[in-house]
Amino acid sequence: MKITDVKAIVLRLPEISSAADGTQDDLIIVVETDEGITGYGEVDTAPNVGKAIVEAYMSHGTCYGLREIVIGSDPFDHEQIWNEMWAKTYYYGRFGPVIHVMSGIDMALWDIMGKSAGKPVHKLLGGSYAKKVRPYASALMPDTADDVKRMTEKYVSLGYPAIKFGWGPLGYDVKFDFKLVETVRKTAGDKIDIMIDIGKRYRLKQAVYMAKALEQLDVYWLEEPLPAEDYEGYKRLTESTSLRIATGEEESGRLAFARLINESHVDVIQPDISRCGGLTEAKKIAVMAADNNIMLVPHAFKTGILVAASIQFIASLQHVPYLEFSVTESAIRKELLLKPFVQKNGYIDVPDGPGLGIELNPEVIRKYGVNLI
C-alpha cells in the first residue's frame, strides 16, 4: 500500500469570535492510498498555517512541505514517516505548528492501518482496557453565577459524571473565580467531579491562593492556572497543595513532555493528539507518564475526529479516568461525523469498527469548507 495524496481541508463557521473555542474552525487531514483506503485526521492549530505546511514546496533538504514527504510511503511505516517528517522540516519545524500538522497526518495513518487490518485503532495500539469511557462535559465558563447554575444543571441532568468549565471570565479576580466555582459545586452536588481551567492567566501567588481555596470544594483538578512555560511556578504550586494540578495541552512532542514532567512535577498531563505528534508520539508520552506514576488525560476540545482518536488512545491504556468531550454548540463540532458520539448514562462507547471508527459528513464539509476545489 502506498500513500497517493494528502489533503488539508479548512473548515470555518461564518462568524467566529476571540473566545477560546477551538470548534469555530478546523483543519481536517485526508490521506489517500492506492488501495482506496482513506484515513482522517484533525489538527488543532491555525488552519491556514497548517494547510500551508502541508502544501509547501521543498525549499531545500530540511525544508519540505509535509505532503511531499509523505506521498509514496507505506502507511504502516508510521514511525519511519514520523521521523522523516521531523527530519525534513527541521529548518522550520521541531515544535509548534509543524508537529501539530504531523499529528493530523499521523492520526490519519492509524485510521488507514486500522481499516486495512479490519481492527479498531486501540487494538493496534496494544490494548483493550475499556469498552466505554467516561466523558466530562467541557464548556467555556459563563460570565454570571446564574448562567453557571443553569449550565451546570443542564449537564448534570444529561448524565455527565464530570464537568469542566474554563476560560471566559476566569483568571482576572480570584474571589470572583471562587464564587463561580462555588456555584458549580453547590449546583452539581457532591457526586459530580469538577475541573476548572484558568487559561494560563494567574501568577504564582494567585494560583496558590486559588488552589488552597478550591481544596474545600473538592475540585478534581485545577488546569493551566499558569503560563505553559512557567515550569518552576508549576513545581512550587504543585508542592503547595493537595489539589491536582493539570497542564500540557500546549506542548508538542515528547521532548517537551519530558521537560514538563521532569521540571514541573504536575499531577496530570494533557497531551492533545491533534497537537502533540499524533498517536505515534502520544504512545511514547503515555509511557513517560506511566513510568513517572502521573495521571494522563488527553485534551480534546475539537470535533468527533479528535474525540475518536482520544477514545481509541484511552481504550489502549490503563487508568485513564476521563475523556474530554466538548459541549459547544458549534455545527462543525456537532455535525462533522455521520454518526456523532453520544453520551449515555455517563459513558461513551468505544467504537469497535475498523480504524478510528468514524465517517465524515460531506454536507458539513461542503457547507463550511474554505476554498474547496
Image (cartoon, rainbow, N blue to C red):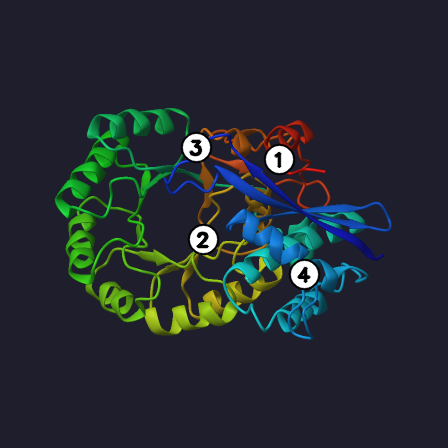
The Cα atoms of the two marked residues, 4 and 2, are separated by: 28 Å
Residue at 38% from the left image edge and 74% from the top image edge: 262
Residue identified by numbered label 3: 328
Q: Earlier in the sequence, mark 3 or mark 1?
A: 3
Residue 165 is left or right of residue 3, and the answer is left
The Cα atoms of the two marked residues, 3 and 1, are separated by: 19 Å
- The mark total stands at 4
Task: Tell me the amino acid under the disc marked 3.
Answer: Thr
Residue identified by numbered label 4: 66
Residue identified by numbered label 2: 297
Q: Is residue 118 visible to the viewer in this orientation of the structure?
A: no
User: Quadrant location of residue 89?
Assistant: bottom right
Q: Secondary structure at mark 1?
A: strand
Position above or below: 231 against 300? below
Image quadrant containing the C terminus:
top right
Task: Tell me the amino acid under the disc marked 1.
Answer: Gly
Residue at 35% from the left image edge and 61% from the top image edge: 228
Q: Earlier in the sequence, mark 3 or mark 4?
A: 4
Residue 178's tag is: none
The Cα atoms of the two marked residues, 1 and 4, are separated by: 21 Å
Residue 369's tag is: 1
Residue 153 is left or right of residue 287, and the answer is left
Q: Residues within 10 Å of mark 2 (few under 14, many from 20)?
A: many
Q: Secondary structure at mark 3?
A: loop
Task: Tell me the amino acid under the disc marked 2.
Answer: Val
Q: Residues within 10 Å of mark 4 (few under 14, many from 20)?
A: many
The Cα atoms of the two marked residues, 1 and 2, are separated by: 31 Å
Which residue of the protein is positioned furthest toward the left in this rendering?
175
The Cα atoms of the two marked residues, 3 and 4, are separated by: 31 Å
